[in-house]
Image: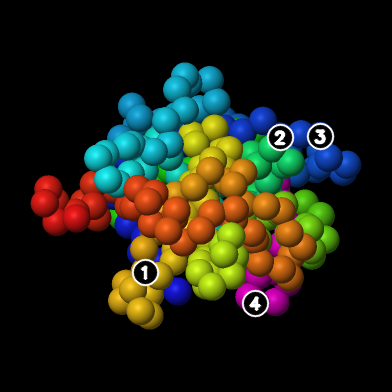
Amino acid sequence: MKSLFTTTALAASMAFTAAAFAARGEANNAPMNVTPMQEEAQPVLEAPDEILSRNRSGDDVLVQHDNYVVMAPNAIAAADVIGAAVVGPDGEETGTVDDLVLTEGKSVDRVIIADGEMFGFGGKMVAIDFEGASITRDQNDDRMVRIGMTDKALEGVAEFDKAPLAEDGGKLASSYIGREVVFATEDDGTGEVSDLILDKRGTAKYAVIEYGGMLEMNDKRVALDLDELKPAAADEPLNLAMTLDELRGEPTFFYDEDEAPKAGEM
C-alpha cells in the first residue's frame, strides 16, 4: 500500500537519554561547541522557539476532532525520519538515517546511520545514541537529524550490524513499518503498519494502520496505541484484536490539518 506523508508539521527537536550498552563510549554523541562560522553554516530552523527536549513538559501526540485525528505539532513520524540527512556540528552532512533502535518500552535509544560513503567504497553503518541529537527540519522543510559528532568522529565508531535486532521483530522502527496486520476475524482481510508516531521525547506511541482498498476503493488510515499490536516474530504478521468493523469505527488519521477534510467532506 502507499501511504501519504506530509511535511508541514512545525520544527520539533528532541533529546533522548540512552541506556548503557557495551562498547558504546566510542559512539558518544555529546553536544559540541560550535563556532560562529560553523553556526552560520548550519541549516536554518524554521521555528527555533519551538525546539523541544526531554526537559519540556507535555506529551501531546494526536489532536482529536469530531471524526478524525491529526498529529500534534510536537509529534514526529518515524517514516519521516528514516532516510533523513544527518548533519554534524560543523553543518556538514555526515550520512543518512538508516533506522531507529527502540527499547523494550518503545523509546528511541539509538540512531543507525549510513555514513556518506555507505554506497561507495569504504562506507559503513554505525549506531550512536541520541543524547545531544535533535530531529528538526531544514530550510526546505525536509526532516534532518543534527548530531554532536563530525564526519571524522564517526569514522572512529565501530561498524554496526543490525541483523540481530531485525530478527527480534520489535527492536527497530523499520520492523513495524510495512508490516502486515491480521485482524481479529479472518474474513476481514489484513492491513498494514505504515508509520509509527513518536512523542517529542522519542517514545513510539501510535501505529498508523492502513486498511481497505480494493472493494473499499480507497485505503483508510487510523492511529492505534502501539500496545494494541501483539508481538510476533520478524517474519510473521502482527495481530490486532479488533475486527474490521471496529477499525472502521476509529477516527481517521491525518498527518496535519491541511491533509484533513474540510467541514462537511467526511
Badge number at residue 120: 4
**What kind of residue is marked 4?**
Gly
Q: Secondary structure at mark 1?
A: strand
- Please name which of the two marks, 2 or 4, marks the residue nearer to the observer: 2
Q: What is the magenta segment's predominant secondary structure?
A: loop
Marks 3/4: CA–CA distance: 32 Å
Q: Which mark is residue 20?
A: 3
Mark 1, other Cα within 10 Å: few <14 / some 14–19 / many ≥20: some
Residue at 40% of width from left, 66% of height from top?
3
Image x and y of residue 75, in percent? 43, 40
Residue sitting at 24 percent across and 55 percent down?
259
Quick check: marks 2 and 3 in contact, CB under 8 Å?
Answer: yes
Position of 191 relative to 26 (above/below)? below
Q: Are marks 1 and 2 in contact (CB under 8 Å)?
A: no
- Kindly state the secondary structure of the residue where label 2 is placed: loop
Q: CA distance from mark 2 to mark 4?
A: 30 Å
Q: What's the CA distance linking mark 3 and mark 1? A: 41 Å
Q: Earlier in the sequence, mark 3 or mark 1?
A: 3
From the top left corner, tell me how far across and down residue 140 is, in percent: 31, 55
Pick whichever of labels 1 and 2 is earlier in the sequence: 2
Q: Which residue position is annotated with label 1?
A: 219
Say whether residue 121 is magenta: yes
Q: Nearer the viewer, residue 238 or 151?
A: 238
Label 2: how many Cα within 10 Å (few below 14, some 14–19, many 20+): some
Residue pointed to by mark 2? 18
Which residues, given as a range, are shown in magenta?
Answer: 116-128
Disc with the residue nearer the chain's start (3 vs 4): 3
